[in-house]
Image (spheres, coloured by chain):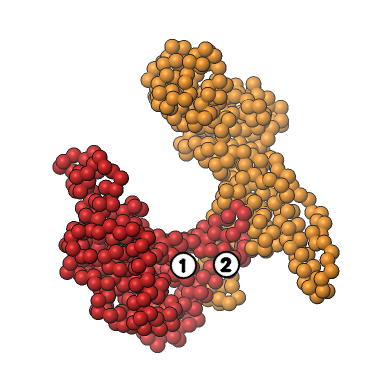
C-alpha cells in the first residue's frame, strides 16, 4: 500500500478494519495493563518559562502560537518512518487530488496540481528520548482566481506530536509502531477528514475527537495562574454554563495578582511537600481542586449560585485559551511544552485500548 | 437626488431584510402606490435597490425623506445595536406639564445652540414613545446621516434610552434632554442591552409580578408507605418553597428578555478554610458576567431548581427590582 498509487477503498470498510487491527494489536501484545490501570497524573511539574526559540525554528514557532487548534487523538502509527516524509507528501497530494476529483468530471487534469502537500519534521518539540519527533503536515493551494505569480497559500495545517509521553507506554510499543498521539489541525473540515482518512489507511491507525475535559481545564487554570510568577497573565477568565432554561452562561474574570495570591494561599497549606523537592516544584491535583473551590466559594458568597452544578467550558489568560470542545490556542511560546505535555497525556488516555 | 442621499438609501435597503422591505416602503408613503407596485420584490436585493434609487430620483426625494424611511424601520425594529439607559433626576416644578410640541421645540433649539449643523427629527410612536433621531455634524461639516443617534423617551417618565451615541456628543445630547424635559440632572442608569423592549418593560414594570402568597401544594395524596410519603412531602415542600421564592423575586409569567448583567466585584475574600486570603487587606478584584437569551428566566430557573439558594440574594434580585444590569460592588455597598 505504500507505493505511489493510491488505491480506493470504501471508507467505512477501511475504518472498520483499522479499528479492529488497533484493538487486535493492543490486546494481542498485552498493552492493556500498562494503560487501563492508568489515570490522569495527579501531580505534575510547575511550568517553567522556557526559551524554546533555541530548540525550535522561529518560523515553526510562529506557526504554532496564536492559532486555534482543533485537537484529536491518534492511535500509534504502523510502519511510519520519519525518513519517508517526501514519499508521504506525494502520496497524500495524489490522494487529495483523487478525492476532490470525484464527481467533478469536467475539470480533470487541472485539479492534480491544486493541492500541494508537504510533510516535514518539526524539530525540537520532543522532550525526552522516547518522544518521536513532531511531524508537520501542510496543504498548500492556489486560490481559484489567483494570478500565475501569486505564491500558493497554506489552506490546511496539522501536526502529530508526542511531548513527554508516558515512557513506560512508549517503551512497551513494538518496534514497528510510532506513537504520536496528539493531532492538532486547523483549516477546512473536508481537508481535515481527507488527511485523517489517508493517515488511517496508510498507517492503520484511528482518530477520535479529543475534548479538553473539566479536569484538564482546571489544571490549565492552575498552571496558567502559576505562570504569573514569571510572566504577566493579565487575568484568568473562566466560563461556566449552568443547566437551566434558557442556559445561563457565567463569565468569571479574576485579576491576575489576586488570583495568584489565592493560588499561593492554597499552595501554602501543602508547603511541606513542595519544600522536599526544592528545584522541582510539583503541583498536586488536590491543590488545583482547592484553588477552584476557593474561586467558586467567593462566587457563591456573593451570588448564592452553585457553579459546580454547571460545566466549566472555557479557560483563558494572556497565555492562551482552551475550550471544552477540544480547541486550544497558545499565545506565548514560553510555556508551550508544558501545555502540550498535558495534552499528550490526555490524548494517550483517550486512546481506545 | 444627490450622491449622499443615494448612498444613504443603498445602505438602508441593505439593512432591511428582504421580507420586510415591502411593508416598510408601504408605511413610508413617499412613493405613490403606482410606483411601489412597479417594484418586483421577488428580484435580488441588488436589483431592487437600483430600481428604488431610480424611483426616488424621479420623485425628487432628498436626504430628509430617506431619513424618514430609516426612522420607520428602526422604530418598528428597535431590538438592534446597543441601547444605554439614562435617568432624569431632580425635576423642576413644571416638569410634569411638558408636552410634546413644547419638548420638540425646546430640544431642537437647545441642541442647535450647543452644536451647529445637527439634524434632528422627532416623531411620536403609537405607544406614547417619543423617538428622536439626531445626525451630528460639527462646526463645518454637514450632518453625518450614516451614523445617526437614536433616542427614545416617554414624557413624564424619568427614563431615556439611547443608541449609537459617541462620547463626544454625549454631553451635548444629555444637556439638551435635561433642559427640554425641565429637569436639573441626568445620570447613567446602569442598564444596557440589545433589546430596547426588554429594557423598557423592566424599568416600566410591564411584566407580571408576583407578591408574596402561599402557593397551593402541588402534591396529590397517594397511598404509599408513610416514610416514603414523608420524604416526598419534605422534598415537595422544599421544592414548592423554592418555586414560591423564585416567583416572588422574578415574577411568574413572561419576563423581559434581558441578555446580560455585569458585576464588578472589589470585595474582601472571606473563606473560613483559607486563613491567608481572609487576612489579606486588599480586595479580591474580579468581574462576573451572566448571559443568557433571557437572563431573568434563567435566574428564576436557577432559584426554583436549587442551583441558586433561596431566598435569592439581593445581588441578583437587584436586577429586576432596581432595573439595572451593571453593578460595581465594594464592601461598603454590600453591607449597606
Do the residues marked 1 and 2 share a common chain?
A: yes
Q: Position of residue A223 (x, y in %)?
A: 41, 71
Q: Is residue B201 visible?
A: yes
Upstream in sequence: badge 1 or badge 2: 1
Locate the C terminus of chain B and report the quarter of the image it occupies: bottom right
Q: Secondary structure at mark 1?
A: loop
For image coordinates 31% across by 76% down, the residue present is: A164
Q: Which residue extends farthest left?
A: A149
Residue A213: image tag? 1
Chain A, colour shown: red
* A277 to B236, vertically: above or below: below
Q: Position of residue A99 (x, y in %)?
A: 28, 52
Q: Which residue is mark 2?
A: A308
Q: Is residue A226 left or right of residue A307?
A: left
Q: Position of residue B256 (x, y in %)?
A: 64, 44
For image coordinates 30% across by 45% down, the residue present is: A103
Q: Nearer the viewer, residue A349 or A64?
A: A349
| Residue B289: quarter of image | bottom right
* B229 to B3, vertically: above or below: below
Q: CA distance from mark 1 to mark 2?
A: 14 Å
For image coordinates 38% across by 74% down, the residue present is: A23
Q: Nearer the viewer, residue B201 or A301?
A: B201
Colour orange maps to chain: B
Q: Secondary structure at mark 2?
A: helix
Residue A115: image tag? none
Q: Position of residue A216 (x, y in %)?
A: 44, 70
Amino acid at each position: 500500500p505504500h507505493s505511489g498509487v493510491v488505491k480506493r477503498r470504501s471508507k467505512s470498510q477501511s475504518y472498520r478494519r483499522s479499528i479492529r487491527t488497533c484493538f487486535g494489536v493492543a490486546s494481542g501484545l498485552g498493552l492493556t495493563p500498562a494503560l487501563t490501570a492508568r489515570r490522569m497524573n495527579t501531580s505534575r511539574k510547575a511550568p517553567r518559562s522556557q526559551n524554546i526559540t533555541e530548540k525550535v525554528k522561529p518560523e515553526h514557532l510562529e506557526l504554532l502560537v496564536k492559532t486555534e487548534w482543533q485537537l484529536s487523538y491518534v492511535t500509534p502509527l504502523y510502519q511510519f518512518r520519519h525518513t519517508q516524509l517526501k514519499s508521504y507528501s506525494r502520496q497524500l497530494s495524489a490522494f487529495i487530488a483523487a478525492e476532490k476529483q470525484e464527481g467533478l468530471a469536467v475539470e480533470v487534469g487541472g485539479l492534480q496540481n491544486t493541492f500541494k502537500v508537504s510533510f516535514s519534521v518539526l524539530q525540537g518539540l520532543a522532550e525526552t528520548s522516547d518522544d518521536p519527533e513532531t511531524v508537520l503536515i501542510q496543504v498548500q493551494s492556489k486560490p481559484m482566481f489567483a494570478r500565475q505569480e501569486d505564491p500558493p497559500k497554506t489552506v490546511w495545517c496539522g501536526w502529530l506530536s508526542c511531548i513527554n509521553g508516558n515512557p513506560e507506554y512508549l517503551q512497551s510499543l513494538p518496534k514497528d509502531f510510532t506513537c504520536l498521539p496528539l493531532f492538532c489541525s486547523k483549516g477546512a473540515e473536508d481537508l481535515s477528514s481527507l488527511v485523517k482518512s489517508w493517515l488511517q489507511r496508510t498507517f492503520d491507525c484511528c482518530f477520535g475527537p479529543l475534548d479538553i475535559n473539566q479536569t484538564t481545564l482546571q489544571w490549565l487554570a492552575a498552571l496558567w495562574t502559576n505562570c504569573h510568577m514569571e510572566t504577566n497573565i493579565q487575568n484568568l477568565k473562566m466560563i461556566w454554563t449552568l443547566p437551566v432554561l434558557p442556559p445561563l452562561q457565567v463569565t468569571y474574570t479574576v485579576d491576575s495578582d489576586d488570583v495568584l495570591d489565592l493560588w499561593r494561599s492554597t499552595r501554602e497549606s501543602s508547603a511541606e511537600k513542595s519544600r522536599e523537592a526544592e528545584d522541582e516544584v510539583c503541583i498536586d491535583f488536590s491543590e488545583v481542586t482547592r484553588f477552584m473551590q476557593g474561586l467558586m466559594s467567593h462566587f457563591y458568597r456573593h451570588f448564592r449560585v452553585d457553579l459546580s452544578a454547571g460545566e466549566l467550558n472555557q479557560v483563558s489568560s494572556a497565555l492562551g485559551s482552551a475550550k471544552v470542545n477540544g480547541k486550544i490556542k497558545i499565545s506565548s511560546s514560553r510555556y508551550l511544552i508544558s501545555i502540550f505535555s498535558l495534552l499528550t497525556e490526555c490524548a494517550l488516555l483517550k486512546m481506545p485500548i | 437626488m444627490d450622491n449622499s442621499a443615494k448612498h444613504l438609501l443603498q445602505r438602508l435597503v441593505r439593512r432591511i431584510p428582504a421580507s420586510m422591505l415591502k411593508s416598510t416602503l408601504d408605511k413610508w408613503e413617499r412613493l405613490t402606490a403606482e410606483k411601489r407596485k412597479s417594484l418586483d420584490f421577488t428580484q435580488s436585493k441588488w436589483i431592487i435597490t437600483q430600481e428604488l434609487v431610480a424611483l426616488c430620483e424621479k420623485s425628487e426625494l432628498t436626504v430628509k425623506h430617506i431619513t424618514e424611511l430609516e426612522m420607520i424601520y428602526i422604530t418598528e425594529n428597535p431590538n438592534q445595536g446597543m441601547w444605554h439607559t439614562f435617568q432624569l433626576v431632580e425635576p423642576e416644578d413644571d416638569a410634569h406639564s411638558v408636552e410634546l410640541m413644547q419638548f420638540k421645540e425646546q430640544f431642537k433649539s437647545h441642541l442647535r445652540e450647543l452644536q451647529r449643523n445637527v439634524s434632528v427629527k422627532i416623531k411620536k410612536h403609537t405607544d406614547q414613545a417619543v423617538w428622536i433621531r439626531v445626525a451630528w455634524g460639527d462646526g463645518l461639516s454637514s450632518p453625518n446621516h450614516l451614523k445617526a443617534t437614536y433616542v427614545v423617551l416617554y414624557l413624564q417618565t424619568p427614563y431615556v434610552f439611547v443608541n449609537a451615541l459617541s462620547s463626544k456628543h454625549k454631553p451635548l445630547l444629555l444637556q439638551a434632554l435635561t433642559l427640554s424635559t425641565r429637569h436639573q440632572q441626568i445620570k447613567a442608569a446602569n442598564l444596557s442591552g440589545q433589546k430596547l423592549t426588554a429594557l423598557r418593560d423592566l424599568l416600566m414594570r410591564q411584566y407580571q409580578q408576583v407578591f408574596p402568597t402561599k402557593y397551593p401544594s402541588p402534591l396529590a395524596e397517594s397511598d404509599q408507605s408513610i416514610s416514603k410519603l414523608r420524604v416526598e412531602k419534605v422534598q415537595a415542600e422544599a421544592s414548592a418553597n423554592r418555586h414560591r421564592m423564585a416567583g416572588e423575586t422574578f415574577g411568574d409569567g413572561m419576563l423581559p428578555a434581558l441578555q446580560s448583567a455585569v458585576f464588578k466585584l472589589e470585595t474582601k475574600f472571606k473563606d473560613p478554610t483559607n486563613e491567608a486570603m481572609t487576612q489579606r487587606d486588599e480586595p479580591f478584584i474580579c468581574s462576573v458576567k451572566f448571559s443568557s437569551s433571557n437572563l431573568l428566566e434563567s435566574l428564576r430557573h436557577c432559584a426554583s431548581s436549587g442551583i441558586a439558594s433561596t431566598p435569592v440574594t439581593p445581588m441578583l434580585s437587584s436586577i429586576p427590582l432596581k432595573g439595572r444590569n451593571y453593578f460595581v460592588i465594594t464592601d461598603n455597598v454590600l453591607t449597606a
